[in-house]
Amino acid sequence: MPFREINSKMIEATVAPGQKLFSQRGAMLAYKGEVSFTPNVQGGQGGIMSMIGRRAAGESTPLMTVEGSGTVLFGHGGHHIQVITLEGDTLYVEADRLLAFDGTLQQGTMFMGSQGGVMGMVRGQVTGQGLFTTTLKGHGSVAVMAHGGVVEVPISPQRPVHVDPQAYVAHHGDVRNKLSSALGLRDLVGRGSGEAFQLELSGSGAVYVQASEEKL
Amino acid sequence: MTTYPGSGPAGPLVHDPATLPADDNVNAYTFCVELKGSEWFLQKGKMIAYYGSMEFNGIGHGRLDRLVRTSFHSPLHASDWVVASGSGKMLLADRAFDVNSFDLEEGNLTIRSGNLLAFQPSLALKQSIVPGFLTLIGTGKFVAASNGPVVFMEPPIRVDPQALVGWADCPSPCHHYDHAYMTGLMGGLRAMTGLGGASGEEHQFEFVGAGTVLLQSSEALMAEQAAGAVPNEPGVPGGGGGPGHQGQQGGAPRLPGQLGDLQRRFGL
């Protein structure tokens, strides 16, 4: 069930009986047909344990379940929306950037330290991701919010991509990332370029970058 | 629509009085009005620049009294509007919100008071029975602001209150409540304890019948403009006429949707 982009800030989702959809609470703009919106205590999928996991990880954005038959329009806070289609790979994204996603996708929480140990945790702090981030895996579509427009930058094994940590939105595919710092004497004396930290992504996949350094 | 600045290969496009469009958008955020001895009503403070000789007069200015009488039917909030007259070109914008013009032909359209920027005097502006909304009737052009592009939808549709910009020709705007998950045993527990929170989508505006509904692309509301008080008479919504109406005062209705917002903030 793909999302259709109506304009840069609004998407349309089709809901059919038996197909579930998760969306951020309060992000519905309008709907046609018989659709119900139920607050989701667990903040997504899985049982009570995944809920506790998300709460503990600070990745529990209030979600609601959208069911019924009809079409629903989503948009939130005037943020730009990027629809990402997953074909079996994993998307890494912050939970509060999730606008809506297919109920068929598997939702999980990942500890930043599991990718690169202590440096992974430092990376989470710099990108504003915190110690944990949300993963979505499977086949389906995800609508992700960003401040300003979103650019998709492909990553190939020969060509790693460097991203400003504050402009980083999400990435998918088989990607290793590390924080590369270019700290020098100039930064110590306050004459730095302001670009001391960069996120280096290598492997194969894609990274989504927003046209702004503002967090959501 | 004209060329957007920056769309050409040679850097930003520089406009002069001849290249500015007449009664059309300059870009998504700016609208250009051409005056040729004619008049436009605009909300105070929305003009950002103009060419030519123009006068901006507050309403109530002697010469304009007749104009106000014929096309302005809400004397109670006339002080929020100015009349631009003269000849030249005038640019309108509102805090970098998307701006669009709409044409009415012997039609009617009801719009949230904060979204309306300017209109031609051939249209009559009246207060809507729905508090906080204004109705335009007649033939002419008006300019409205919205957060994100405006989307037109056909009824039947249910709309989030914050996303509604306005509607045309729909006779029956009404409230719709969806509390299905609050029923049954689990729903009762949820309602009693407050656990689980609200989805924030329990309350919508419902439109049926023939017409068009205008939506903005986000739930960020424009600042409400005073639409003027209504006469304090029994039977007037928002007028506070009868003793039973006291609870409904104060502009936008405070309804369960707002509760959801609150709980959202607490992370429930």
Image (spheres, coloured by chain):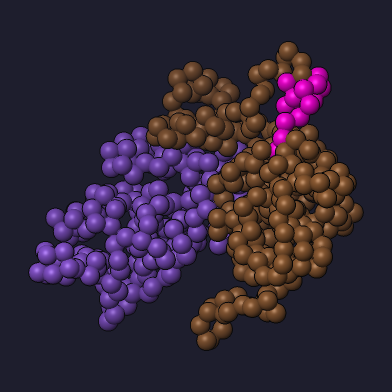
Chain colours: A purple, B brown
Q: In this rendering, does residue B1 appear at all? A: no
- Based on the picture, tell me whether residue B237 belongs to the magenta stretch: yes
Give the side of residue B192 with respect to residue B136, left or right: left
Residue A114: percent from left, percent from top? 20, 55
Residue A75: percent from left, percent from top? 55, 51
Residue placed most toward the observer, A165 or B48: B48
Q: Can you say which quadrant of the picture contains the N terminus of chain B?
A: bottom right
Q: Which residues are magenta?
A: B227-240
Residue B159: percent from left, percent from top? 66, 43
- Based on the picture, tell me whether residue B17 belongs to the magenta stretch: no
Q: Is residue B188 above or below residue B63?
A: above
Give the side of residue A89 with respect to residue B42, left or right: left
Q: Is residue B258 above or below residue A175?
A: above
Residue B103: percent from left, percent from top? 80, 60
- Classified by dominant secondary structure, the portion drawn in magenta counts as loop
Give the side of residue A72 with respect to residue A138, left or right: right
